Image (cartoon, grey):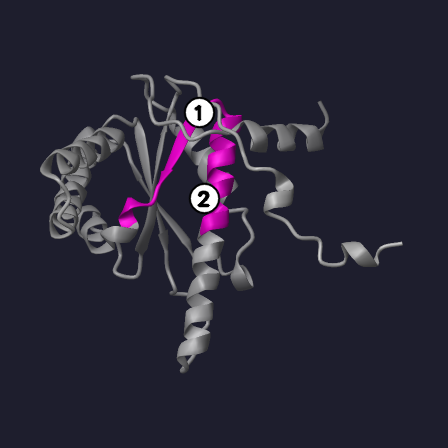
Amino acid sequence: MNKADCILENIRARRSIRRYLDRPVPRELIEKILDAARWAPSAHNRQPWRFAVIERAETKRALAAAMGRRLRQDLERDGVAPSVIENDTARSYERITHAPVVIVVCVTLRDMDVYADTRRKKAEYLMATQSVAMATQNLLLAAYALGLGGCWMCAPLFAPDIVRDVLNLDADWEPQALITLGFPAEEKTRERVALDLRVKFLDADKRG
């Protein structure tokens, strides 16, 4: 298989894996995955991503419990049924604590351009978060290529202060996602909608 076919196959075959074998992930694999993440394109080449790697069980438990409390509070305010709240908080706790490795993906504006007006401030922030998202995709693809499973969890967006405080992260590190990693204990298949339902070739009618 040539390089192009290999890359395309990895993109098509990668799936979100939530169940992992009880097997540690070697540090060298984690470092390879993070190295792949840092080669993503970024706005102004400022590389505004930051990664906090969690391997210790007690740290995962502390983070999962704190995030679960915030989730419970939000759902109670929404008037969600107690049984649903219990299921949602338990599922979130299990996903975080049962993963051999958890990577907290953060964005920082420390090195981004600074503007006085709201319009450009917003654009700069979006550029930074888009850069971090591209790095996260690199991370997930690298994990798959190295035989690992991974899952992207956006829960930190609902509790960035909680995540930052529990992990004692720098004040400018804004949590964006959790990536759980491990050797897969499940297989997944998933379809995508047809390409023509998501794409419009604007100049198609002008081609000869």
Q: Residue at x 25, y 60 (%)?
A: 171
Numbered range of the magenta stretch: 133-156
Q: Position of residue 67 (x, y in %)?
A: 18, 44
Q: Residue at x 17, y 32 (%)?
A: 87
Instruction: Look at the numbered disc 2 and give the secondary structure of its residue.
Output: helix
Q: Residue at x 54, y 60 (%)?
A: 45
Q: Position of residue 82 (x, y in %)?
A: 10, 38
Q: Residue at x 17, y 36 (%)?
A: 84
Q: Are discs 2 and 1 less than 8 Å apart at CB?
A: no
Question: Which residue position is annotated with label 2?
Answer: 136
**Precedes in sequence: disc 2 or disc 1:** 2
Q: Quadrant of the C terminus?
A: bottom right
User: Tag 2: residue type?
Assistant: Thr
Q: Position of residue 57 (x, y in %)?
A: 20, 29
Magenta span includes 145: yes
Q: Nearer the viewer, residue 83 or 119?
A: 83
Q: Is residue 144 left or right of residue 106?
A: right
Magenta span includes 12: no
Q: Quadrant of residue 207?
A: bottom right
Q: Position of residue 128 (x, y in %)?
A: 45, 60
Question: Which residue position is annotated with label 1?
Answer: 148
Question: Residue 22 bears which disc, if any?
Answer: none
Whether residue 191 is visible here, answered yes or no, is yes
Q: Is residue 195 left or right of residue 55?
A: right
Specify the farthest residue to the bottom.
116
Instruction: Look at the numbered disc 1 and give the secondary structure of its residue.
Output: loop
Whether residue 35 is visible here, answered yes or no, is no
User: Tag 1: residue type?
Assistant: Leu
